[in-house]
Amino acid sequence: MAQRGMSLGGVPRRERRTPLAFRESGRMRRRELDSRLLILVTLALVAFGLVMVYSATSAAAAVGGKDPSYYLKRQGIYAALGIVLMVMAQRWDYRRLRALAPPLVLGSLVLLVAVLVIGPAINGARRWISLGPAVFQPSELAKLAVAIWAAAYLSRNPAPRDLRELWRPIGALTAVFCVLLILEPDMGTAIALLVMLIGMLLVAGTPTRTLAAGVSIAAALGTVAIYLEPYRRARFFAFLHPWKDAQGTGFQIVQAMIGMGSGHFFGVGLGQGVQKIFYLPEAHTDMMLANIGEELGLLGVAAVIGAYALFAYAGLDIATRCKDPFGKRLATGLTVLVCGQAAINILAVMGSAPLTGIPLPFLSYGGSSLVVLLAGVGILLNIAHRGGAAAASVPDRSRGNGRSRTAVARSRGSADRARRARDVRRVAGSRRSAARS
């Protein structure tokens, strides 16, 4: 007799693969593609950001007699630290973050209160805590903490169906965070936090009418906050009519438009821009895209927008394919956090939205933002590798509380016993029907 697995001619038989095996292999290849695309886009944006930070700061520093590579060195250190955290987060099981959600939220609230008390006032704002040579921005950690907590809550509880359910506890906790952020003042981060939560609630299944009502209330409160603060009110009216006061409140928007327009299609050349030296405020942070538009033109701006579009595609595909509810919601939140901030910054620089002070993710100068976002990418990569293998939960009708149980495969013996029992019932039924006939 021929050996098992061998043909009659002694040639090994080709291993048969079931359709399920083919589908699982396709899913694994898709997850690998998403992970590689995410890593490639992230590292490309970080590397490009280092180049543009040097371009935006070196000329002004040289003119002022300072170290031209000062900002580049600091951003490089933060980028290295962020990449180390990204690798660690990629290898650490993201599901352990569920237990860390309450301490992270509590710690973030304490830091947001502390920065209002001990934080140094810089340009009229208290947003940073100095730790020796390093500077830390608690609001960046707050965004990650809220994303983890909201994902944990929405994975354990049904999605809010009305405003009352939306308010308790997600709306109440978000309101506390937003109030502390506006007191710094940092309304841009509060907006980014709301955009992230909207994306997570949509994925969780919250009705759009409930979200629309919640967003309307938040927008009304935000309008009040803008009206009560003179500088916010001036920024808003400068957005509506920037050329009306081009040398005053509209100066930054006007100079950004001039920089974007003077680059034309290919730009004036890397490092050759003049707006960053004498005219454009915050060229290395909030206005980084204007510097890119001047030096690399429409081609450079389109490449940046395309990179964020690829990031959104990979991140949302990871969220879609994740079987774990916690991982699905967390992946959505982290993806929307990056791409939502990018969209708000791009619209503001182009004059299509009011200036909010939100930096361009991975590109703008800022250590806290870069480190936290890279750690978030590491969590996304971990979800891509582990989320597809997460155990699915199925409704358990035998439980009185209606909770789900983990789906497990039955042993072969139990399957055989069930099959034999069905066969006996089938045979008995056929005999009874034959007797009746």
Image: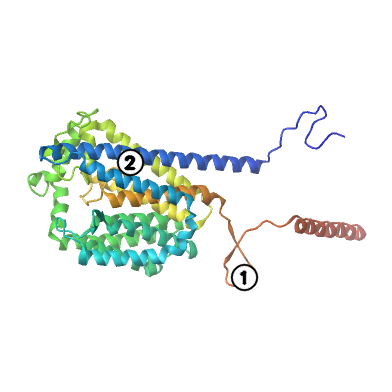
Residue 98 is marked as none
- Tell me, yes or no, if residue 29 can be seen here: yes
Residue found 33% across the figure and 54% down from its top: 195
The local crowd at label 1, few if under 14, some if 14 to 19, many if 20 or more residues have their Cα within 10 Å, is few
Left or right: residue 16 versus residue 253 is right
Q: Which residue is mark 2?
A: 46
Counting from the top left corner in percent of width and height, residue 324 is at 52, 55
Q: In the picture shown, does residue 143 fall above or below 247?
A: below
Residue type at the position of mark 1: Arg
Q: Identify which residue is drawn at 83% across, 60% down.
A: 425
**Relative image position of residue 264 (x, y in whole percent):** 21, 29
The picture places residue 245, in percent across and down from the top left corner, at 8, 47
Q: Quadrant of residue 41?
A: top left
> Is 19 or 380 nearer to us in this picture?
380
SS under mark 2? helix
Which label sits on residue 399? 1
Q: Earlier in the sequence, mark 1 or mark 2?
A: 2
Q: Is residue 230 left or right of residue 88?
A: left
Residue 423 lies, with reference to residue 258, above or below; the image says below
Q: Neighbour class for label 2 at 10 Å: few (<14), some, many (≥20)?
A: many
Color scheme of the displayed model: rainbow
Q: Decide if residue 159 is in sight here.
A: no
Q: CA distance from mark 1 to mark 2?
A: 50 Å
**In this rendering, would 34 be left or right of 415?**
left
Q: Quadrant of the C terminus?
A: bottom right
Name which quarter of the figure residue 211 lies in: bottom left
Which quadrant is the N terminus positioned in?
Answer: top right
Q: Residue at x 81, y 27 (%)?
A: 9
Amino acid type, residue under disc 2 in the picture: Val
Identify the residue at the far right of this view.
435
Is 48 above or below relative to 389? above
- Number of marks in the image? 2
